[in-house]
Image (cartoon, rainbow, N blue to C red):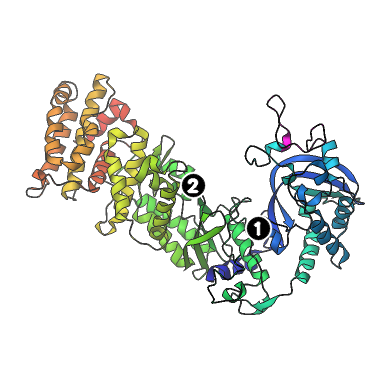
Amino acid sequence: MSWIQKLYDTYEQCAGLPQFANHPLLPISHTIQQAHVEITLDGNGNFRRAQVIPKIEITLPATEKSAARTSGESPHPLCDKVQYCASDYPKHGGKKKSYYLSYIEQLTNWTKSSFSHPKAKAVLDYVRKGTIVADLVREKVLCVDDDGVLLSATKPDQPTPEIFKYLTAKEGKRDQGDAFIRWRVEKPGDLIPETWEDQSLMEAWIGFDASQNQAEGFCMVTGQSMVLAQSHPKRLRHGGDGAKLISSNDLSGFTFLGRFTDADQALGVGFEVTQKAHNALRWLLTSERKQAFRSGDQVVVAWAVSGMSLPDPFVNSAEMFGLETEQKDVAATYQGDAGQAFAGRLNKCIAGYRARLGSTDEIVVMALDSATPGRMAITYYRELTGSKFLERIQLWHESCAWHQNFSKNLKFVGVPSPRDIAEAAYGRHVEGKSGEKLRKATVERLLPCIVDGRPIPRDLVESTVHRTTNRSGLEKWEWEKNLGIACALFRGHHKQRSYHMALEHDRTSRDYLFGRLLSVADHLENRALFVAGEKRDTTAAKLMQRFSDHPCSTWRTIELSLSPYKTRLRSKRPAFLAAMEKLTDEIVSAFNGQDFMSETRLSGEFLLGYHCQRQALRPKDESNTTEDTTENQTNQGE
């Protein structure tokens, strides 16, 4: 139960803090709901006007049962559906069962108690008149046919009513009884007519709701005797989320199998504890906080119990540092930077977080997912100190950093995001709903690599490398993106080899040298094509996959194909050709023993050699399209 304890502590430490004034935590005994209709009353409960509103989430008073309801009779105390609030709903042909009597009884009990509120009393006075549907039809908010029956569908030649745009269709029909009503009560001198924003009304309901809960017991979270929760909140990930983390609906004893007589014996959680814990989780998962990574129904969130900001572990390095800073660095000329500039930015960024976040502050990383609409599970959970969390984030970005080329406007040095890694490894298999399961599984497997410092799964590395070597099967932009990701994963998987992001002349491993050879051949043919004004793939690009499987024999094929291009360059770019031939000889002579003649399949290391050699031959500003710039660089190398 440590997860609920940490969420409860988060609520206690963050509620009411001024820095969260624009996005406060939800108070207890309240829930989030999407409203469709807004009715405005005066202070005496007289109808003034009504309008259809887009689906907007509001905070509204709720009972323990109504906050967790999926079906059945559990009215909210104030704002609710037409099915609950309107006594004339059945008279207008409402197809669903009316729950007006239970709604009016609960609202009456509240207004008769010592926790009554004038706005709740105004709503009660209006609801008792029994004219809600009639008033909404008159205001053209709800639609009826000639017999006064609420429409469930419109004819093709008729315009679609505005309310139909916001109601969920079931079998092609919409029930206007599902329209959710929120109330405004306008009184002289009252600057907040919106009931969902009135703090005094919220406090009045909280007091009344607390007085109704009498079942006390032992809370397994706090270790104290208090009023226990009979059900637990839902709508955690979004307004329509029906999955719960804690639930028990077995009244016949089949689930308990004789171990317990009721659910409280299996798990007892205080009403206030579960309300605050779930509200804290809902607060953390909202988009305004920007702390959660989402992939379909899967949500991963990292937070500090104290409420301090954290580096997002689920974004790429460009988003972590800020795109503007990265782009300025990318525009700089490549001068053999082995990662020093990136390491400096990373250290500066992490140092900023260390200055604000205490080394012993509690950090929690939690992943949630649901296999069914009503049940949610915690698929990953870790508790770390602030220093350990920052250390892991820094290690992830340092060990897997590489030159990334996502697009013309997004080039950076660093780590790709888990989503980018999943796409690079499996391509179109992770697209759409059909690939959601594979995408979520990949993200879940990468979580321990980021948070726990575990090695990247080997099959994930191999899959990314294999797709990258199939260069002819990818679009140019996609291949460039995959190349950087594959190099990053391979480097991170083999931390002990200490690969640099710049060309290593003293690295003489077979795979690295073959990668350098392929890059030189690619560069030489590209220059010859440029001189002739041709634009097409080089032989090295076309044969990259075959080269990775059979390097020695494929190199002979590539080398023979270079003969006409060498002839062209010998007459037009002799200095460049001499430099490339000299570089080729140096690489070949660096092979150990019979490594050059071996046909053993190349590992992903050859992509590192290829990429580093290509970076060394090409200016960082991609000005290789200008002959003089590249020619000058080559001459300087001589």
Q: Is residue 380 above or below residue 183?
A: below
Q: Secondary structure at mark 2?
A: loop
Image side of residue 468 versus residue 433, left or right:
left
Quadrant where the N terminus lies?
bottom right
Whether the magenta-drawn stretch holds residue 248 is answered as no
Q: Which mark is residue 63?
A: none
Mark-to-mark CA distance, 2 and 1:
23 Å
Residue 55 or 453: which is nearer the viewer? 55
Q: What secondary structure is found at the residue carrying circle 1?
A: helix
Q: Percent from the top left, x then y, of residue 625? A: 32, 27
Residue flagged by tag 2: what amino acid is it? Gly
Closer to the chain start, of discs 2 and 1, is: 1
Q: Residue at x 54, y 76 (%)?
A: 258
Query: Which part of the image, by quadrant, shows the C terminus?
Result: top left
Name the residue that disc number 1 marks: 20
| Location of residue 11 in the rendering, given as x and y in whole percent from the top left corner | 63, 65
What x and y, as percent, mark residue 185? 85, 50
Q: Is residue 148 magenta?
A: yes
Circles 2 and 1 in contact, beta carbons < 8 Å: no
Q: Nearer the viewer, residue 189 or 329?
A: 189
Residue 467 place in picture, x, y as percent: 30, 41
| Residue range corresponding to the magenta coloring | 139-163
Q: Is residue 67 above or below residue 505?
A: below
Q: Main secondary structure of the magenta part?
A: loop
Determine the residue located farthest toward the left in the rendered image.
Answer: 593
Residue designated by label 2: 322
The amino acid sitting under disc 1 is Phe
Along the line of sight, the residue nearer the viewer: 374 or 185: 374
